Image (cartoon, rainbow, N blue to C red):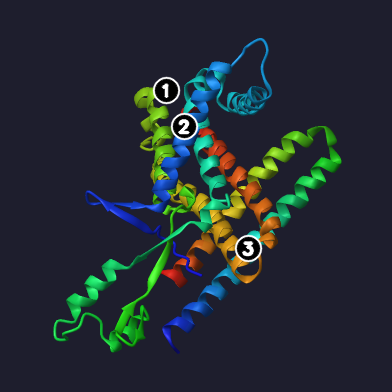
Amino acid sequence: MEVEAVKLLTMAFVMAIGAIGPGLGIAKIATKSVESVGRNPDAAGKVQSLMILGIVFTESIAVFVLVVALMIKFL
Amino acid sequence: MHVSIAPERLINILGFDLTNTVLTAFIVVALIIAFAFFVSPKLNFANPGKLQLVFEVAFGYLYDMVCGLMGSKIAKQVIGFLFSLLLFILFSNWFGLLPIVPSIAINHTNEEHVESVVATEAKHEEELSVSKCIETKNCYLTVSGVEQFEEPVHLLRAPTTDLSMTVSFAIMAVLSINLLGFKTLKLGYLKKFINFSNPINFIVGILELLSEFIRIISFSFRLFGNIFAGELLLTVITFLSFGIATLPFLFLEIFVGLIQSFVFFILTAMFMTLAVEQHH
């Protein structure tokens, strides 16, 4: 197979497989935080800040995967 | 549709390449400074106007958050640096969404490629040959011979889509975290990294040293990946359909730009908190 075709396929697979982990992680974080707000509505502000922070850290893993995929195709 | 991770070179001044991201960064800095100059005479302590109130609310919220993290004594020293970093990253992210950014393009030929082709084709008389053309796909055949493609290069590009710029932000942030640690704890800051009391603590110290460098990569790639992916998404959507269809993605990009600059701010503040705490 040509290099260009392998590059395209690899980029697609890398991104598809790499988005599974952060997707599940963010779902877990959001579930737990919504549940805890439901149990204790007064703590909504604190829980929201912590949730945003947790989501950002997990999302950055997906961004690293995206950067690797872009590098495979364009570099 | 032409997209490249590396920023495109506009002109070459004194041996330095002026790329389109650097030009946009200059424009953003000029805008921020002009804004500061025009607004500061009108600042009023007793009777604040609307714009002043907006900035006071934002600054108050961020300052309270940083005070809550590291105490107000150290927060007073670092809030200037952190807030200006936040403003610069925020306006750099948002500048890439303006409609003038993808529309102004200048044509110039790829001069470096022509030179490299000339160097490798010493035997042929003409500069470009058809076989080289088929290999590199960089030119097309006309009646008068082979001609190079003229690649249109965007004049402006959001500064944070440049990996060099985000790496510089990350190095600045990590350097400022360590300098704050040295300033507050004097030489006791090194106890975080070099700790001979325990074999386990020694390994932990080495890992802490390693994680400083990993933080540089993590900061820079997070910011770069988010903003570059957004710009790529907008380019692809515009290429596939018409202009107004990018409206929901523009809202997403405004949100992402705001969140990423805020995340840079709060992560730097949190690592500063970790750097200045006294170890027991």
Q: Name the residue under label 1.
A: B184
Q: Which residue is drawn at 56% across and 19% down?
A: B72
Mark 1 surroundings within 10 Å by alpha-carbon count, few (fewer than 14), some (14 through 19), many (20 or more):
some
| Whole-percent x, y for residue A12 in the image | 56, 74
| Whole-percent x, y for residue B122 in the image | 14, 81
Q: Label 1's element?
A: helix
Mark 2 surroundings within 10 Å by alpha-carbon count, few (fewer than 14), some (14 through 19), many (20 or more):
many
Q: Residue at x 79, y 36 (%)?
A: A44
What amino acid is labelled 1 in the image? Thr
Q: Which residue is drawn at 63% across and 52% down?
A: B253
Is the residue under label 1 in contact with that under label 2 (CB below 8 Å)? Answer: yes
- Which image quarter: residue B235? bottom right
What amino acid is labelled 2 in the image? Ala
| B92 to B277, vertically: above or below | below
Query: Which residue lies most toward the front here?
Result: B144
Chain holding disc 2:
B
Q: Mark 3 points at which residue?
A: A21
- Closer-to-camera residue (B206/B173): B173
| Whole-percent x, y for residue B46 in the image | 66, 10
- Closer-to-camera residue (B93/B73): B93
Can marks 3 and 2 be said to lie on one chain?
no
Is the residue under label 2 in contact with that under label 3 (CB below 8 Å)? Answer: no
Q: Mark 2 points at which residue?
A: B275
Q: Which residue is drawn at 66% across and 66% down?
A: B242
Left or right of B19? Residue B74 is right
- Which image quarter: residue B94? top right
